[in-house]
Amino acid sequence: MSYSEVTIRRNKRPQDMTMDELRNAVEDQGLQFYKQQYEANPTQENKAELDRYAAQRGINLDPVVSRLHQLPMEKLAKEWETKGKAVEDEQLDKWRMQQARTWIESQPSFEPNGPNGKLVAAELERRGLRGSVYDLQICFDALVESGQIQPQEVPPTPVRLNYSAEELRSMPLNKLKQLAEDVAGPSEF
């Protein structure tokens, strides 16, 4: 209901109003009565009476929710999309940053600098990918393959292989497993 409709209805005499207008006017007056009662004496009892009156008539006292109920569906949908898009973009950026940190830590051949980062970001956009660790690896591999990024040389991790049989037998099981993974790669067990 617009402001002009409310003004016109309040300026009408009761005999000139339709039944719906009379009902709305009575509900408005009742709501105003309970609001004034609560404002004059803010007790739990008066608050409960105001809430009960509003609930019986389907009136929401929260101004934000009331405003949303009064908006036309098209305007509400547009506002929802606009604000939702902003929140979604912010959350996506945070998620992408976390994914990028994880990928950079796990990819020693990638040199994290401005130009390389821009190339990977452009490749993500070009492919329409969201930016997961897997997506970043796909883009990095494609850029290396096309020669746009030169991977850093990663020196192999030194592994001591000259343990005696006695050293291996006395080694704790978790250290022995770690040694095996260092030499042969991760185990499924």
Image (spheres, grey):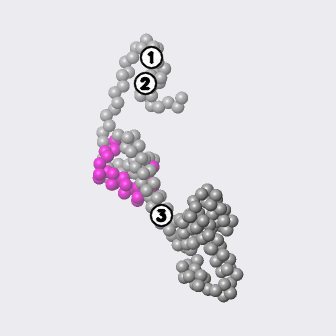
Is residue 154 placed above or below 123 in the rendered structure? Answer: above
Q: Residues within 10 Å of mark 3 (few under 14, many from 20)?
A: few
Q: Which residue is mark 1?
A: 171
- Is tag 1's residue or tag 2's residue first in the polypeptide sequence? 1
Q: Which residues are magenta?
A: 109-132
Q: Which residue is mark 2?
A: 179
Quadrant location, the N terminus: bottom right
The one nearer the camera, 74 or 178, is 74
Q: Are marks 2 and 3 in contact (CB under 8 Å)?
A: no
Q: Are marks 1 and 2 in contact (CB under 8 Å)?
A: yes
**Which of the numbered marks, if any, corresponds to residue 83?**
3
The question of residue 113 being in magenta is answered with yes
Question: Residue flagged by tag 2: what amino acid is it?
Answer: Leu
Question: Which label sits in the foreground, 2 or 3?
Answer: 3
Q: Residues within 10 Å of mark 1 (few under 14, many from 20)?
A: few
Q: Callout 2: helix, strand or loop?
A: helix
Query: How far across and how far down the image is residue 51, in percent?
Result: 63, 62
